[in-house]
Image (cartoon, rainbow, N blue to C red):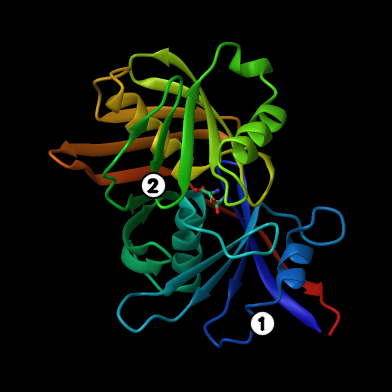
Amino acid sequence: MLLNFFKYQGTGNDFVMIDNRKEFFPKENVGLVSFLCDRRFGIGADGLILLENDEDTDFKMVYYNSDGRQGTMCGNGGRCIVAFAHYLGVVDQNTSFMAVDGLHNATIANGIVSLEMQNVGEIKEKSNSLFLNTGSPHHVQLVDGLKDFDVRKEGAKLRYGLYGEKGSNINFVDQTAEDTFNVRTYERGVEDETFSCGTGVTAVALAMYHSGKTNRDLVKIVTPGGNLQVKFRSNANGYDQIWLTGPAKLVFKGEINVES
Ligand SMILES: N[C@H](CCC[C@H](N)C(=O)O)C(=O)O
């Protein structure tokens, strides 16, 4: 059978997007999802996202990593699905939708999507890193020579070594100005470096503020796939009003042959 899909990218973090409002997609088929995400045998993507109906909000986002398993929250995927919902005519400029970590507000204008992330409470400080959950778990570590750093090798080492089978996403960071950071991320579930990670750059912005590297509440992040901004408010218990902003684009649409 031929399966209709759309391909989106948000700062180079790319996703197969499927309109599953009619609920035809076999959601537990790990092999099918990893095939669709495969860059040689399939379409190729860091993850796959289903857009579904939701009773209380505009739509529901169901996210899978490229290994075919349902993941925790995906920030760039969240921005891309807002662009997709806008393209389908499901939403106008403002929306709220449901994801695995709860309700998200978002806005879209001129291809730029701002997505509100869940509030963040605890940030754990370790000897040379920080750890927090922004919808997905993130290790944040400053390194020298980020440009030539072996993100895949060092990321894999920490992802398994420090965080075990369940793992964590691993972000390596370099500060270039008071309010600007370069970030490269190793993503669990993709088990490789991706060009950008939305929950990751959100974690970096909060972790850098928390550890005093910046005192700005609007942080600019440069990833290999482009630029993102994170705005937030610090409060007695942590952080709220956390907004991730950047471009989200439709790349192409098509049909893929799926053996059934
Ligand atoms: N690329 C995603 C992160 C996916 C999280 C995933 N790798 C996991 O931990 O399950 C983002 O933009 O936030």
Disc 1 within 8 angstroms of ligand 1 (CB):
no
Circle 1 residues within 10 Å: few <14, some 14–19, many ≥20? few
Q: What is the number of the mark on residue 138?
A: none
First of labels 2, 1 by sequence position: 1
Q: Residue at x 51, y 64 (%)?
A: 84
Q: Residue at x 17, y 42 (%)?
A: 237
For the N terminus, the image quarter is bottom right
Direction from residue 96 to residue 184 in the image, left or right: right
Q: Nearer the viewer, residue 68 or 127?
A: 127
Residue 73 sits above or below residue 20 on the image: above
Whether tag 2 and tag 1 are in contact, CB under 8 A, the answer is: no
Residue 137: x and y, percent? 46, 46
Q: What is the number of the mark on residue 134?
A: 2
Task: Tell me the distance, in whole angstroms, between the alpha carbons under discs 2 and 1.
Answer: 28 Å
- How many numbered marks have been drawn onto this rendered protein structure? 2
Type of the residue with mark 2: Thr
Residue 132: x and y, percent? 39, 40
